[in-house]
Image: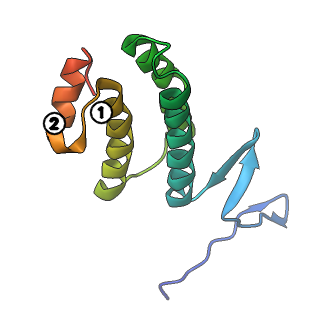
Amino acid sequence: MGKNTESKIVINDKIIEEVTEFKYLGYCISEYKRDLEDKLQIFNKISGTIRRYFGKQMTKETKLRLHNITAKEALKFGSDFWVLKKRHKQRLEAAQMKFLRHLLGITKLDNEKYTSIGKKLGHKT
């Protein structure tokens, strides 16, 4: 048997077409790498909006709460079945870290670890 065997799904004598992406309830379901890139882009847009437009108008706690219910949820939506490689997990952590560092006024040069930033915010990361 060859390596590229194809399986066909048949329902009521009709072959179901194989696709790489489709829309379900307004959400595009595709292979997770592309989905991950789209989610990271949305996450970064929301995080950037919070930083730019609510910078001095809100407390850190309020900005963090807003971030958790918007940006983080947008990132997680549809990710229930992702099987992430180490590199992809690192990219997700880096996106989250970027927002948290800015929230606390910490730069990359301060060399703060992800876990210590979480402790400063009083929650597990």
Q: Amino acid at mark 1?
A: Arg
Q: Is residue 68 left or right of residue 124?
A: right
Task: Give the residue drawn at x 55%, y 32%.
Answer: 49
Give the residue at x 36% y 51%: 91
Q: Is residue 79 visible?
A: no
Q: Position of residue 48 (x, y in %)?
A: 51, 36
Q: Nearer the viewer, residue 13 or 84?
A: 84
**Callout 2 amino acid:** Glu
Image x and y of residue 10, in percent: 76, 63
* 52 in relation to 19, above or below: above
Depth check: 71 or 124 in front?
71
Question: Is residue 44 visible in the rendered structure shown here?
Answer: yes
Q: Residue at x 54, y 46 (%)?
A: 39
Label disc, if present, on residue 34 of the rendered structure: none
Distance CA(mark 2)–CA(mark 1)? 9 Å
User: Residue furthest toward the bottom?
Assistant: 2
Q: Quadrant of residue 9?
A: bottom right
Few, some or many C-alpha atoms within 10 Å of disc 2 (few <14, some 14-19, many ≥20)? few
The image position of residue 125, as x and y in percent, is 28, 28
Q: Is residue 28 left or right of residue 74?
A: right
Position of residue 98 measured from the top left corner of the image (x, y, whole percent): 35, 39
**For the residues bearing labels 2 and 1, Cβ distance under 8 angstroms:** yes
Tell me where residue 24 sits by quadrant: top right
Q: Kindly identify which residue carries mark 1.
A: 101
Q: Which residue is mark 2?
A: 112
| For residue 11, side relative to residue 122 (left or right) | right
| Foreground residue among 3 and 107 | 107
Tell me if residue 45 comes above or below residue 50 in the rendering: below
